[in-house]
Image (tube, rainbow, N blue to C red):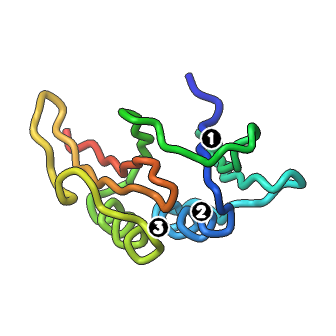
Amino acid sequence: MFSHIMVGADNIDVAKQFYDAVLGALGVAPGEIDPKGRCFYRTDTGVFAISTPIDGSAASHGNGSTIGFYAASPAAADAWHAAGLANGGITCEDPPGERDGPNPLYLAYLRDPSGNKICALHPLG
Protein backbone atom coordinates (compact mmCIF):
# COMPACT_ATOMS: atom_id res chain seq x y z
CA MET A 1 0.00 0.00 0.00
CA PHE A 2 2.76 2.49 0.87
CA SER A 3 5.68 3.44 -1.32
CA HIS A 4 7.48 5.57 1.27
CA ILE A 5 7.23 7.51 4.50
CA MET A 6 9.04 10.81 5.03
CA VAL A 7 9.41 12.67 8.32
CA GLY A 8 10.66 16.16 8.98
CA ALA A 9 13.79 17.01 10.92
CA ASP A 10 15.53 20.32 11.55
CA ASN A 11 18.96 18.67 11.72
CA ILE A 12 19.48 15.93 9.13
CA ASP A 13 22.85 14.90 10.61
CA VAL A 14 21.34 14.30 14.06
CA ALA A 15 18.35 12.50 12.54
CA LYS A 16 20.58 10.34 10.34
CA GLN A 17 22.73 9.31 13.31
CA PHE A 18 19.57 8.30 15.20
CA TYR A 19 17.95 6.42 12.30
CA ASP A 20 21.22 4.75 11.23
CA ALA A 21 21.33 3.33 14.79
CA VAL A 22 17.69 2.26 15.21
CA LEU A 23 17.21 0.97 11.68
CA GLY A 24 20.66 -0.61 11.76
CA ALA A 25 19.52 -2.61 14.81
CA LEU A 26 16.82 -4.04 12.51
CA GLY A 27 19.30 -4.87 9.73
CA VAL A 28 18.72 -1.81 7.51
CA ALA A 29 21.75 -0.25 5.79
CA PRO A 30 22.75 3.31 6.74
CA GLY A 31 20.81 6.08 5.06
CA GLU A 32 22.07 7.84 1.95
CA ILE A 33 21.99 11.62 1.58
CA ASP A 34 20.73 12.82 -1.81
CA PRO A 35 21.80 16.06 -3.59
CA LYS A 36 18.91 17.94 -1.91
CA GLY A 37 20.17 16.96 1.57
CA ARG A 38 17.43 14.42 2.28
CA CYS A 39 18.28 11.05 3.81
CA PHE A 40 16.83 7.82 2.38
CA TYR A 41 16.69 4.26 3.76
CA ARG A 42 15.72 1.80 1.04
CA THR A 43 14.62 -1.81 1.57
CA ASP A 44 12.75 -4.40 -0.49
CA THR A 45 9.58 -3.49 1.39
CA GLY A 46 9.66 0.31 1.21
CA VAL A 47 11.50 3.57 1.68
CA PHE A 48 11.85 5.69 4.81
CA ALA A 49 13.16 9.23 4.40
CA ILE A 50 14.07 12.33 6.42
CA SER A 51 13.92 15.88 5.10
CA THR A 52 13.99 19.41 6.38
CA PRO A 53 10.54 20.94 5.76
CA ILE A 54 10.42 22.45 2.27
CA ASP A 55 8.31 25.39 3.47
CA GLY A 56 11.18 26.62 5.64
CA SER A 57 9.25 26.21 8.89
CA ALA A 58 10.52 24.14 11.80
CA ALA A 59 9.93 20.41 11.68
CA SER A 60 7.09 19.15 13.86
CA HIS A 61 5.73 15.75 14.74
CA GLY A 62 2.27 14.57 13.75
CA ASN A 63 0.11 14.58 16.88
CA GLY A 64 -1.53 11.14 16.95
CA SER A 65 0.87 9.72 14.34
CA THR A 66 3.07 6.68 14.84
CA ILE A 67 5.40 5.07 12.31
CA GLY A 68 5.96 1.36 12.90
CA PHE A 69 9.01 -0.66 11.89
CA TYR A 70 8.92 -4.47 11.72
CA ALA A 71 11.23 -6.27 14.16
CA ALA A 72 12.15 -9.90 13.48
CA SER A 73 12.00 -10.78 17.20
CA PRO A 74 11.38 -9.25 20.63
CA ALA A 75 15.17 -9.12 21.06
CA ALA A 76 15.44 -7.08 17.84
CA ALA A 77 12.78 -4.67 19.15
CA ASP A 78 14.72 -4.32 22.41
CA ALA A 79 17.97 -3.68 20.48
CA TRP A 80 16.13 -1.07 18.38
CA HIS A 81 14.89 0.65 21.54
CA ALA A 82 18.32 0.62 23.19
CA ALA A 83 19.97 2.00 20.04
CA GLY A 84 17.42 4.79 19.95
CA LEU A 85 17.97 5.77 23.57
CA ALA A 86 21.74 5.77 23.02
CA ASN A 87 21.36 8.10 20.02
CA GLY A 88 19.08 10.86 21.24
CA GLY A 89 15.69 9.15 21.33
CA ILE A 90 13.25 9.43 24.20
CA THR A 91 11.16 6.52 25.40
CA CYS A 92 7.39 6.98 25.31
CA GLU A 93 4.29 4.88 25.87
CA ASP A 94 4.73 1.79 28.04
CA PRO A 95 8.16 0.12 28.34
CA PRO A 96 9.02 -2.37 25.58
CA GLY A 97 7.06 -5.56 26.02
CA GLU A 98 4.12 -7.75 25.11
CA ARG A 99 0.69 -6.24 24.50
CA ASP A 100 -2.40 -8.41 24.80
CA GLY A 101 -5.25 -8.35 22.35
CA PRO A 102 -6.73 -10.43 19.57
CA ASN A 103 -3.31 -10.34 17.88
CA PRO A 104 -0.60 -10.29 20.59
CA LEU A 105 2.34 -8.03 19.80
CA TYR A 106 5.73 -7.11 21.19
CA LEU A 107 6.11 -3.32 20.96
CA ALA A 108 8.76 -0.73 21.75
CA TYR A 109 8.11 3.02 21.37
CA LEU A 110 10.41 6.03 21.00
CA ARG A 111 10.33 9.66 20.00
CA ASP A 112 13.13 10.55 17.62
CA PRO A 113 15.24 13.70 18.17
CA SER A 114 12.63 15.73 16.22
CA GLY A 115 9.72 14.38 18.28
CA ASN A 116 8.33 11.92 15.72
CA LYS A 117 6.75 8.89 17.43
CA ILE A 118 8.07 5.58 16.13
CA CYS A 119 7.59 1.96 17.11
CA ALA A 120 9.28 -1.41 16.63
CA LEU A 121 6.71 -4.20 16.32
CA HIS A 122 7.01 -7.96 16.41
CA PRO A 123 3.84 -10.03 16.01
CA LEU A 124 3.62 -12.82 18.60
CA GLY A 125 0.63 -14.74 17.29
Marks 2/1: CA–CA distance: 12 Å
**Residue 54 tag number:** none
Looking at the rendered structure, the secondary structure element under dot 2 is: helix
Amino acid type at image mark 1: Met
Tell which circle, 2 or 1, labels the residue nearer the N-terminal end: 1
- State how far apart marks 3 and 1 are (Cα): 20 Å
In this view, which residue lies farthest toward the right? 35
Whole-percent x and y of residue 36? 86, 51
Residue drawn where x is 51% and y is 56% of the image: 114
Q: Which residue is mark 1?
A: 6
Taking the spot 55% from the left edge, 62% from the top edge, the residue there is 19
Q: Which residue is mark 3?
A: 25
Identified at 22% across, 50% down, the residue is: 93
Q: Position of residue 1 (x, y in %)?
A: 56, 22
| Residue most extreme to the bottom | 86
Amino acid type at mark 3? Ala
Left or right of 112 on screen, residue 10: right
Pointer 3 or 1: first along the chain: 1
Please state the horizontal and vertical placement of residue 28, each as a whole percent of the image. Answer: 58, 60
The residue where tag 2 is placed is 15
Image position of 25 (left or right of 108): right
Residue farthest to the front, as pictured: 57
Task: Give the alpha-carbon distance from disc 2 to disc 3, as whole Å.
Answer: 15 Å
